[in-house]
Every structure is written in C-alpha cells, then in structure tokens.
Amino acid sequence: LDLDGGPFAGWSPWPVHDDGVLLWVRLDRVGGEPPTRRPAVPARPARGASLAAVYTGTGACEPEDVVANRLDPWHGAWLHPYSFVDLAVRDVPDGAPADDGKDVLLVDVSFKVAGRIVVPVRAAFHAPDARTVVMRIVEGEGTGSVVETHATPLTPAGAGRPRTAVVEAVVAGSDRRGFAVARALAPLLRPAVRATAGRLWRDDLAYAERRHRLRAEGRFPG
Ligand SMILES: [Fe+2]
C-alpha cells in the first residue's frame, strides 16, 4: 500500500475468495489476463474430516518450470530418496486430448514415514490449468487426499530474472479411526507437514531454477 500520511488512503479493495484453505486475491489488470470470477479450486476431502497445511516458497524461475518439476513423475525417486521408494510410473497421457480434459499421470510410490516404515499409495497427477498441478491419492492410505500446487508469477511475463511463488496445499483425509485424533492434533501436525513439504521443495525449487537457467541459456531441449 502506498500511503502518503493523509487521513484517507484512497485505495479500493481487491476481490478476494476464501476457499477454506487458501485465500485468493484477484488482481484483475495486473496479471494481463482476463480474470475468472472465482479461482478453479480442485475437489478436496470434506473439511470436517481432513487436515490441511500450506507451504509457501519462492523460486528464481517461471511458473512453467515449477509445473514441469511437478509433472515429472520419475524425479521423486532420485531427487527425494529420503522420502520416496519403489516408484513406478503406471500410466502417462498418450498426447491425445482427453475426453474429460483431464490427462492423468499415474504413479505407484511408497512414502517413507520413519525408519523402514513406508506407506504405499497410487497417486494421480493432473494439471487443471497452466499453473496448477493436483496430485490425488487414488489407492492406499489416505485415498482422496490431495496436494495442490499453485505456481504464481511474481514478476511480469518475460522478466529477465523471474520469480515464482509456490503455494502448496496438502489436504489429507483418511477413513482410519486414528485420523480423528490426528485432526485434533492438527495444530501440532501442521508444522510437521509443512516441514516435509519444505524439505521436498528445497530440492524441487533447485530443479525448477536449474531448468530455467538452462532454458535462458538455450541449453534446454524443446
Ligand atoms: Fe519433487
């Protein structure tokens, strides 16, 4: 806000949307794109039966570099060996337009919880728009849980030194009886979920920033 010390600020409010997990501000002309009335929020587990945590980070890259990292299903095993094992890509879009507009990447992977304890799941990745990637657990522990990643440009298109915000909401649900207890412990668990996302994103942002550097130097294929 640009305040000049006068009694009235003279600003006008921006339209906002509170989706229960994320608060969206519509910047209208700033983005240089026609605004939508509401953000496209993917389906999430019911609020009363889920645990939500949000990670926010910033990278020296463009949104497409963040999305490219998120849509590279193979990288989890070699970039995050501390978190993922037994990763296998089961299905990738064939390049043809999908009937429902939802091309999906299917990945089987085990998430390391502690020591040798792992949780095997099947995850489906899709990109509902050019700056959003949604991962949904479709089989295994926490089926229906989503991790939605939003890449928001902080610099104008074509900026020499672009910066992009990564806002990632983890919305976890489970039918297990113990999950109600976990929900009650949400204030304690949230920092742990955020810390896990933060560790993964330290590596993922390095990936996205390197991809951007290679693109800027013309050394990236495609
Ligand atoms: Fe990653």
Image (spheres, rainbow, N blue to C red):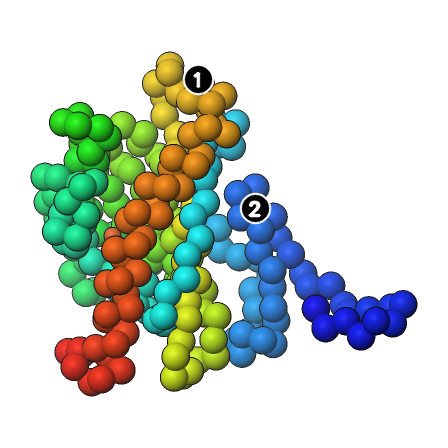
Q: Which mark is residue 181?
A: 1
Q: In the displayed structure, does residue 213 sit left or right of residue 42?
A: left
Question: Which residue is the site of mark 2?
Answer: 19
Q: Please say if 83 is above or below 32.
A: above
The answer to whether marks 1 and 2 mark residues whose Cβ atoms lie closer than 8 Å is no
Q: Quadrant of the N terminus?
A: bottom right
Q: Quadrant of the C terminus?
A: bottom left
Q: Position of residue 110 (x, y in %)?
A: 17, 35
Question: Residue most toward the right?
Answer: 7
Asked if residue 126 shows in the view, the reply is: no
Amino acid at the residue labelled 2: Asp
- At horizontal 46% and vertical 28% (from top left) the residue drawn is 188
Badge 2: how crowded within 10 Å, few (<14), some, or many (20+)? few
Residue 105 vs residue 152, the one in the foreground: 152
Question: Residue most toward the top?
Answer: 177
- At horizontal 40% and vertical 76% (from top left) the residue drawn is 162
Badge 1: how crowded within 10 Å, few (<14), some, or many (20+)? few
Amino acid at the residue labelled 1: Val
Q: In the displayed structure, does residue 18 sit left or right of residue 63?
A: right
Residue 42 vs residue 198, the one in the foreground: 198
- At horizontal 37% and vertical 65% (from top left) the residue drawn is 59
Tell me how far mark 1 sits from mark 2, CA to CA: 24 Å
Q: Position of residue 142 (x, y in %)?
A: 32, 29
Secondary element under disc 1, as helix, strand or loop, is helix
Q: Position of residue 46 (x, y in %)?
A: 48, 32
Secondary element under disc 2, as helix, strand or loop, is loop
